[in-house]
């Protein structure tokens, strides 16, 4: 029996509500398969922990997580703790410490999912973002000089290394090749005359190793417009940390909303655990009311199954989500339904068994 050891970090706000549905669904998958099982260990880290202990996670947190096969994260952030502290103290620390340099975010309009765009066919919105997740604009490099004086100056550096750019682009080219899809690079070489000129140059260089992959390259402003006007133009997209962050929220908006969007933070070498999460935040406005949509977390669970080479189960989870969405009966309020978070999770579990 194969055992997948999962570190569960429910986090803040709606995090615990959605993550328990995700675990429930994964347990059912393992039960039905019979060939593997999950061993969950929960860590109580997040903003509440911070208020008690002055830190977002235990001091030896990274060391303790390093023995797991994967991390399943709800969401972090809550009023009372500044967002840059909650983000850097947990999520970004994990991404960086475990060299999870690929952020994989599917933007696919599921059957039955709402779409605000007019005149698009469902199959027109089917793309996957490969977002650079370890450096770029979120490298955390900069300085704050003459703080709190009239002369104060802040510098926030974008950090683009050859190593960092090459590896993310290679990952994207491999993915596009395997799935026989086109690869689009999104950058901004006209205005960012160092970092993005370098990015474009490396994209062209790496591309020469993949003559069979059809490529395109767009400026980020044009790409955002095209995602709305001609979403069918995009299949696999590779982009920087900041641009990927923003474009995937736009992607979530055109593919069913934040209640559906998921992301995987992957260390492709599997030297460290990878992390799977819904991309939405802790939604303090609806926390504790059992009305949060757990489907984004279920999608993240599907990505985890793919990562463990249980691809057939990963696909099956998406199929079941599509059935639930199409039927439209058991959905949370954000999808126009009246069901609770747990009822949606139970529905997925029961349909998996049918
Ligand atoms: P948010 O994603 O938490 O909420 C935005 C809006 O979407 C809210 O109206 C919320 O009710 C709704 N929403 C989000 N997820 C939903 C779900 N599953 N079902 C139904 N409705 C849902 O973003 P916001 O409000 O900007 O941030 C709240 C907190 O979360 C902040 O502290 C922020 O720093 C943190 N955050 C954490 C992230 C993470 O842990 N990965 C990502 C984004 C924000
Ligand atoms: Mg974001």
Image (cartoon, rainbow, N blue to C red):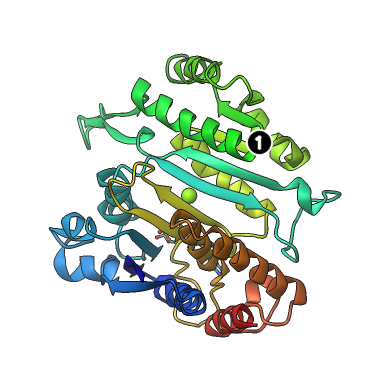
266 in relation to 201, above or below: below
- What is the crowding at mark 1: few (fewer than 14 residues within 10 Å), some, or many (at least 20)? some
Whether residue 328 sits left or right of residue 61 in the image: it is right
Q: Looking at the image, which residue is at 25% across and 26% down?
A: 151
The quarter of the rendered structure image containing the C terminus is bottom right
Whether residue 200 sits left or right of residue 157 in the image: it is right
Q: Residue 240: give x, y in percent of width and height.
A: 47, 33
The quarter of the rendered structure image containing the N terminus is bottom left
User: Which quadrant of the structure image shows residue 276?
Assistant: bottom left
Q: Looking at the image, which residue is at 72% across and 64% down?
A: 113
179 in relation to 152, above or below: below
Kindly identify which residue carries mark 1: 180
User: Which quadrant of the structure image shows residue 337?
Assistant: bottom right
163 in relation to 234, above or below: above
- Secondary structure beneath label 1: loop
Q: Is residue 75 visible?
A: no
- Nearest to the observer: residue 310 or residue 136: 310
Q: Is mark 1 within 8 Å of ligand 2?
A: no
- Nearest to the observer: residue 185 or residue 176: 176
């Amino acid at each position: 029996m194969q055992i997948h050891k999962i570190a569960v970090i429910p986090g803040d706000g709606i995090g615990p509500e959605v993550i328990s549905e995700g675990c429930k669904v994964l347990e059912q998958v393992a039960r039905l398969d019979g060939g593997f099982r999950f061993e969950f260990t929960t860590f109580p880290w997040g903003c509440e922990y911070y208020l008690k202990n002055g830190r977002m996670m235990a001091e030896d947190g990274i060391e303790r997580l390093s023995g797991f096969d994967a991390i399943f994260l709800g969401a972090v952030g809550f009023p009372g703790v500044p967002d840059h502290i909650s983000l850097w103290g947990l999520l970004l620390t994990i991404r960086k410490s475990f060299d999870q340099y690929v952020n994989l975010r599917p933007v696919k309009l599921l059957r039955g999912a709402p779409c605000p765009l007019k005149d698009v066919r469902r199959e027109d919105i089917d793309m996957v973002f490969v977002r650079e997740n370890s450096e770029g604009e979120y490298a955390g490099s900069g300085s704050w000089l003459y703080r709190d004086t009239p002369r104060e100056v802040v510098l926030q550096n974008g950090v683009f290394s050859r190593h960092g750019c090459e590896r993310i682009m290679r990952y994207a080219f491999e993915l596009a090749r395997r799935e026989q899809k086109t690869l689009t690079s999104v950058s901004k070489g006209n205005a960012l005359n160092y970092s993005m000129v370098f990015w474009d140059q490396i994209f062209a260089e790496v591309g020469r190793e993949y003559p069979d992959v059809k490529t395109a390259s767009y400026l980020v402003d044009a790409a955002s417009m095209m995602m709305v006007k001609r979403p069918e133009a995009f299949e696999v997209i590779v982009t920087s940390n900041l641009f990927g962050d923003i474009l995937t929220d736009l992607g979530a908006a055109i593919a069913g909303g934040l209640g559906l969007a998921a992301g995987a933070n992957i260390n492709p070498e599997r030297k460290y655990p990878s992390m799977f999460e819904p991309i939405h935040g802790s939604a303090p406005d609806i926390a504790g009311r059992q009305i949060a949509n757990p489907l984004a977390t279920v999608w993240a669970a599907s990505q985890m199954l793919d990562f463990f080479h249980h691809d057939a189960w990963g696909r099956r989870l998406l199929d079941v989500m599509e059935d639930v969405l199409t039927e439209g009966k058991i959905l949370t309020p954000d999808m126009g339904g009246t069901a609770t978070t747990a009822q949606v999770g139970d529905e997925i579990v029961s349909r998996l068994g049918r």
